Structures are given as C-alpha cells and as structure tokens.
C-alpha cells in the first residue's frame, strides 16, 4: 500500500478554488486500477485541507500521478496557498 497525503493551507479567499482543484485531481484518476480511494478532507480544527489518496502500490501511484497532475497543471497554487504544500509519501511498515 502507498498513501499520498497533501496538506494545504489556502488563503481564505481561494479556499473554494483549491477545493475544486483537489476534486479535479481526484476525478482524473477515480475508478482507475490501483487506486483504492481518494479524498478531499477539511481539518475540523483549522483552515487546512488534506488530500488523501490510497494506492495499491507506489508503482500504481507513479503510473496514475501524471494524469492527476495534468488535471491541475495550470492551477496557481503559489497564489492560492499561504505556504508550500506539505506532501507526504507514506508506505506501510
């Protein structure tokens, strides 16, 4: 299993645009072989948004990631985000 977790800190005025972007990222690979699930989550205690994608393997992630990234390639994250995205690439141990 391979998990991609992306923690976002949107500027309040760009929150909806960022959520839309996260949904487009997920929709680009939803239902594909090797993707177990993909979620856009809001932290109850802050303004942070979390993207969570669970893949069967790192290889499945690497195969599907270009398609997902292409869906949001033109999005201005540097404008929308207060700080750079905190991305985690997690493997089960």
Image (spheres, helix red, strand yellow):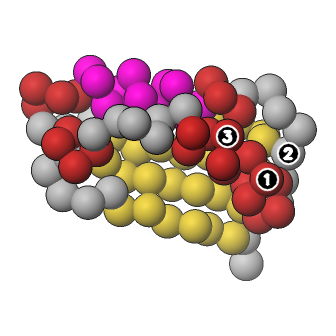
Between discs 2 and 3, the one toward the N terminus: 2
**Dominant secondary structure, magenta:** helix
Q: Which residues are magenta?
A: 16-26
Q: Residue furthest right?
A: 33
Residue occupied by mark 3: 67
Between discs 1 and 2, the one toward the N terminus: 2
Q: Give whichever of 57, 71 is nearer the camera.
A: 71
Q: Residue at x 66, y 50 (%)?
A: 65
> Mark on residue 76?
none
Give percent across and percent down for residue 92.
Answer: 72, 70
Residue 80 lies left or right of residue 42; in this view the side is: left
Residue 7 lies left or right of residue 34; in this view the side is: left
Residue 52 lies left or right of residue 77; in this view the side is: right
Residue occupied by mark 2: 34
Tell me if residue 83 is in the magenta stretch: no
Q: Residue at x 46, y 40 (%)?
A: 73
Crowding at mark 1 (Cα within 10 Å: few <14, some 14-19, many 20+):
few
Residue occupied by mark 1: 63
In front: mark 1 or mark 2?
1
Which quadrant does the N terminus fall into?
bottom right
Tell me if residue 24 is in the magenta stretch: yes
Give percent across and percent down for residue 10.
Answer: 20, 40
Q: Secondary structure at mark 2?
A: loop
Q: Give whichever of 77, 38 is nearer the camera.
A: 77
- In the displayed structure, 52 sits above or below 2; it is above
- In the displayed structure, 75 sits above or below 19; it is below
Find out whether the residues at labels 1 and 2 contact each other: C-beta distance under 8 Å.
yes
């Amino acid at each position: 299993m391979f998990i991609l977790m992306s923690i976002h800190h949107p500027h309040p005025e760009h929150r909806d645009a960022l959520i839309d972007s996260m949904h487009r990222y997920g929709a680009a690979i939803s239902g594909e072989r090797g993707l177990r699930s993909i979620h856009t989550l809001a932290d109850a205690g802050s303004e942070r948004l979390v993207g969570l994608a669970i893949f069967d393997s790192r290889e499945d992630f690497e195969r599907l990631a270009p398609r997902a990234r292409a869906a949001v390639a033109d999005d201005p994250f540097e404008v929308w985000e207060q700080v750079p995205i905190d991305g985690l690439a997690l493997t089960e141990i």
